[in-house]
Amino acid sequence: MKISTGALSVATLSLALLSPAFGQSTAPATPNDQPETAQQAQQMVPARATLSRALDAGVAQPGSEFRATLNDNVHLNGGAVLHRGDTLVGKVVTDDMNTPGKSRLALRITDAVLKNGQTIPVKATIVGLYPPDDFPSNGVVQPEQLPNTWTHGILRVDQPGVVHGVDLHSSVSSANSGVFVSAKNNVKIPGGSELALAIAPAQNTNTSNTGL
């Protein structure tokens, strides 16, 4: 099949604009970062998942469960493999970073549930979020084509305006996956939003510290 050069140029430009590095502030490792945080990052790998349903800070209470579906196969450090279509399970929690804002929605992904029913405890950091509105209706770029450009040197992420007036803040050092904050409006994350993640097997499966 012959593809025109013009079509490829449009697709390449669209992918560049939708890359997690676009419109996102990432903080590389610095001498002030704890060595443990850098070590944690070294154990993590990129992943992408789609949020199964909408999340609303005005409705969701600490302890409320949410789910996301993996978009690709993921080879975790240590040998375990998560497959496309497997489920990530998490909970709404309290914000352990004390992020200022009128409305906050803190999330913590805790487990990957495989199709065979096996559960693998995981630690995941949200390094980007892209709502369904980010993808053009002309089909040039689909969510499954969106790359995750996270690298081991990125320990913190601040992504403004992920959803109308809502910012994302996350850190590899945090027990939580990330917090969505708004200075004016109630935080609402649409169902079908794409999550870019850094993920690893959980080092400590003790569930006594839930952050609820």
Image: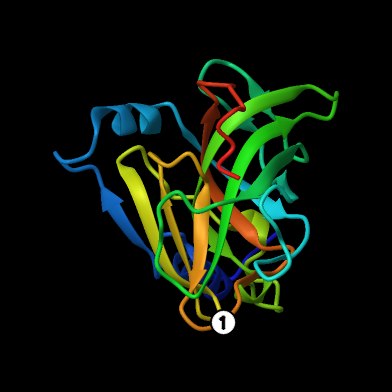
Q: Residue at x 70, y 40 (%)?
A: 88
Which residue is found at the position 77% from the left and 55% from the top? 52
* Of 29 and 2, the residue lying toward us: 29
Residue annotated with mark 1: 185
Question: Residue 101 or 196: which is nearer the viewer?
Answer: 101
Viewer can see residue 9? no
Q: Position of residue 191 (x, y in %)?
A: 74, 64
Mark 1 surroundings: few (<14), some (14-19) or many (≥20) residues within 10 A: some
- Asked if residue 189 can be seen in this view, the reply is yes
Q: Which element is circle 1 on?
A: loop
Q: What residue is shown at x 70% (from left), y 57% (from top)?
A: 61
- Residue lying at the far top in this picture: please name it: 78
Position of the C terminus by quadrant: top right
Pinpoint residue 158: horizontal percent, then vertical percent.
38, 61
Q: Please, which colouring scheme is shown?
A: rainbow
Q: Position of residue 172 (x, y in %)?
A: 40, 41
- 127 sits to left or right of 26: right
Q: Nearer the viewer, residue 132 or 176?
A: 176
Image spot of residue 102 (x, y percent): 49, 75
Quarter of the image that includes the N terminus: bottom right
The foreground one among 50 and 144 is: 50
Left or right, residue 194 beside residue 168: right
Q: Residue at x 58, y 22 (%)?
A: 206
* Residue type, mark 1 in image: Asn
Choose top left, top right, bottom left or bottom right for residue 159.
bottom left
Above or below for 136 versus 199: below
Direction left: furthest residue: 31
